[in-house]
Amino acid sequence: MDQGAPEREGYHRMYDFVIHPEWDSIGCETLYVKLLFADYDQGFAIVELLGEWNDVVHNDVMEVKRRLADPMILQGIQKFLLLADNLLNFHGGEEDYYAEWAEDCEAGWIVFLNARDQVLQDLRAVRLTPYVWAGERYRYSAWRVQDPLALCQAVDELIQKQLGA
């Protein structure tokens, strides 16, 4: 590569935007992920989302479940913290993959942390709340400065309180 040329290899495109190669493509046209943390002993994973989650047109949940969650579940991850600060839109479809994912994580949970208001409305509208945790309680803007394991444990404690355990 020409030493004076800007580095362009590995960059992704979404609409008219260029996405840094540190974001992983998992087969979704408008959704990228970044695995920030995984503790296989404790069974926690933190995944940051970028873009648009679209089950209606692209069945993104299938790609997220098959390419990201399933391999991690096989390794003992049961608790998925999905950082939704940069999830701009959510278009839910059928609930089958969400139900399957929740069942696979029976001893754990799937949380959308910091989801935007319209994303929360869309989650409720397609009736995914039995499978995922999301809402005002799961807004925590200082997550970036929090120790990842401490953040996962704090979310776990919040869920346990809600369940009355």
Image (spheres, rainbow, N blue to C red):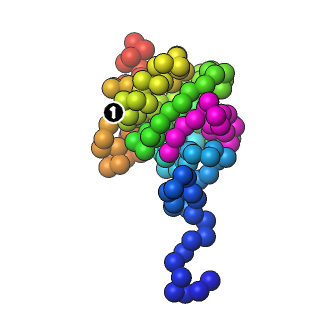
Single out the residue that lies furthest toward the top: 164
Q: Please report the residue visible at 38 percent of the width from the left and 16 percent of the height from the top.
A: 162
Single out the residue that lies furthest toward the left: 142
Amino acid found under the numbered disc labelled 1: Arg
| 162 up-or-down from 119: above or below | above
Q: Please report the residue visible at 57 percent of the width from the left and 71 percent of the height from the top.
A: 8
Is residue 141 something one can see in this rendering? Answer: yes
* Magenta range: 51-67
Where residue 38 sits: x, y (%)? 53, 45
Q: Residue 106, located in which quarter of the rendered image?
A: top right
Q: Closer to the camera, 126 or 145?
A: 126
Q: Please report the residue visible at 61 percent of the width from the left and 65 percent of the height from the top.
A: 10
Where residue 24 sits: x, y (%)? 59, 53
Single out the residue that lies furthest toward the bottom: 3
Q: Residue 94, located in which quarter of the rendered image?
A: top right
Q: Closer to the camera, 126 or 75?
A: 126
Residue 47 forms part of the magenta stretch: no
Which residue in the structure is indicated by mark 1? Answer: 139
Q: Closer to the camera, 123 or 160?
A: 123
Residue 56 forms part of the magenta stretch: yes
Q: Is residue 97 left or right of residue 147?
A: right
Q: Please report the residue visible at 36 percent of the width from the left and 29 percent of the height from the top.
A: 117
Where residue 131 sits: x, y (%)? 54, 21
Q: Is residue 162 left or right of residue 22?
A: left
Q: Residue 100, located in which quarter of the rendered image?
A: top right
Is residue 153 something one can see in this rendering? Answer: no
